[in-house]
Amino acid sequence: MSHPANGLDDVVHQRVRLGILTIAHEARRVEFGFLRDTLDLTAGNLGQHLTVLEKAGLVDIEKGYEGKRARTWVTLSAAGEKALRDEITQLKRLIHDIERATPKKNGRRPAAP
Amino acid sequence: MTDASVPQSTPHELLSATRELTRRVRTTQRGTGFPLLMLGVVTLLAAPFERYGHVVRTCESNHPAGSYVCSLYPSWLFVYWPVALTLAYVAIAAMAIRRSLQRGVGTRIKPYVIAGVVLALALTAITLWIAHNPTAHQAFLGGRRVGSTELSTFVLRLVSPAAAIGLALIVLARIERNWSLLAFALGYLVLVVGAVNFGWDMTRSSHWVFLPHLVILGGVLILGGICFQVVERRTTP
């Protein structure tokens, strides 16, 4: 069986991009400003992460106007849904493996060779 | 590269960050106050229709000896409730879409609005059928004639528009993952089905005998709406 770390997608396994995917999944449709404020990023930084996700086909970006105000809405694509689900599964597996491998505080440490 | 500025996180940190973000989005999406206020007003506005609505009296023979079973129901309520509830749910949907645009997050209101309208129409249809088929209704309850009044009243409360409001609120609590709203909806349904009037009674001969229960239900919805709105204002980022 392969190590769970091998199943991690480099595009998704990154704090900010995982955050974007999580918010887009929960919100269904999320506005650029909400993402920027919630993830505490600059507009430029967020824009770069969104470009990476869009190029990977994980999000769809829709630009429009609300009155005179420009608005950018982000939606999770089907591939994005799957990528997020896979990432969460792999993270849980990693945590499980780490916890199994780490001796308990009260348990005896293995004898030194 | 963008990643260079972001420190590496452990799987634990990444998972707890996703949980926190999920919680924040759900809190931002919540909008329970307005639906409760709207439905409370709709409930109170039913009073004149109940009091002055034309009463339908349907009687059917129920016994070989010639006894009759009669039902009385203010007919205007058959029009008022489905129309008022449908309009209320349309207003709730419009408000949710407006709030979604303002806050920058999508809304999950659609299943609630659909459930609300479907329940309102379905339960009105059942009440209409019961009002026009009193003996069939009794047969449905097991053919009991004597002592079945309480059971009939219970069934009528269970299919009332007030119950439709409560059942739809359970759907809203589910889609918003809102435990407080679920507790509120269940408490409200207990008031509906138990016809709780907190000792505020009117004589059976009064034309306003329905009023205490109606005011209590409307009042509870409005009060709940105000409380939820206050909490939402405090917790929404």
Image (spheres, coloured by chain):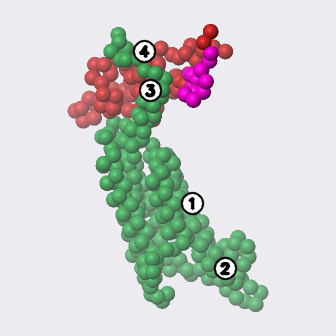
* The magenta stretch spans residue A100: yes
Q: Which chain is green?
A: B
- Name which of mark 2 and mark 3 comes first in the sequence: 3
> Disc number at residue B13?
3
Tag 2 near tag 3, CB within 8 Å:
no
Q: Which residue is the site of mark 1?
A: B122
- Check the residue under mark 4 and report the chain it is in: A
- Name which of mark 1 and mark 2 comes first in the sequence: 1
Three-letter amino acid code at the position of disc 3: Glu
Q: Nearer the viewer, mark 3 or mark 4?
A: 3
What is the display colour for chain A? red
Q: Position of residue B142 (x, y in %)?
A: 73, 73
Residue A15 in sight from this viewpoint: yes
> Disc number at residue B133?
none
Q: Which residue is the site of mark 4?
A: A55
Q: Quadrant of residue B60?
A: bottom right
Q: Which residue is the site of mark 2?
A: B148
Q: How many C-alpha atoms fall within 10 Å of the one at disc 4: few (<14), some, or many (≥20)?
A: few
Q: Quadrant of residue B16?
A: top left
Q: How many C-alpha atoms fall within 10 Å of the one at disc 3: few (<14), some, or many (≥20)?
A: few
From the image, which quarter does the N terminus of chain B lie in? top left
Residue B53 in sight from this viewpoint: no
Q: Nearer the viewer, mark 1 or mark 2?
A: 2
Inter-mark Cα distance, 3 to 4: 26 Å
Please report the residue visible at 51 percent of the width from the left and 16 percent of the height from the top: A9
- Asked which secondary structure carries label 2, the reply is loop
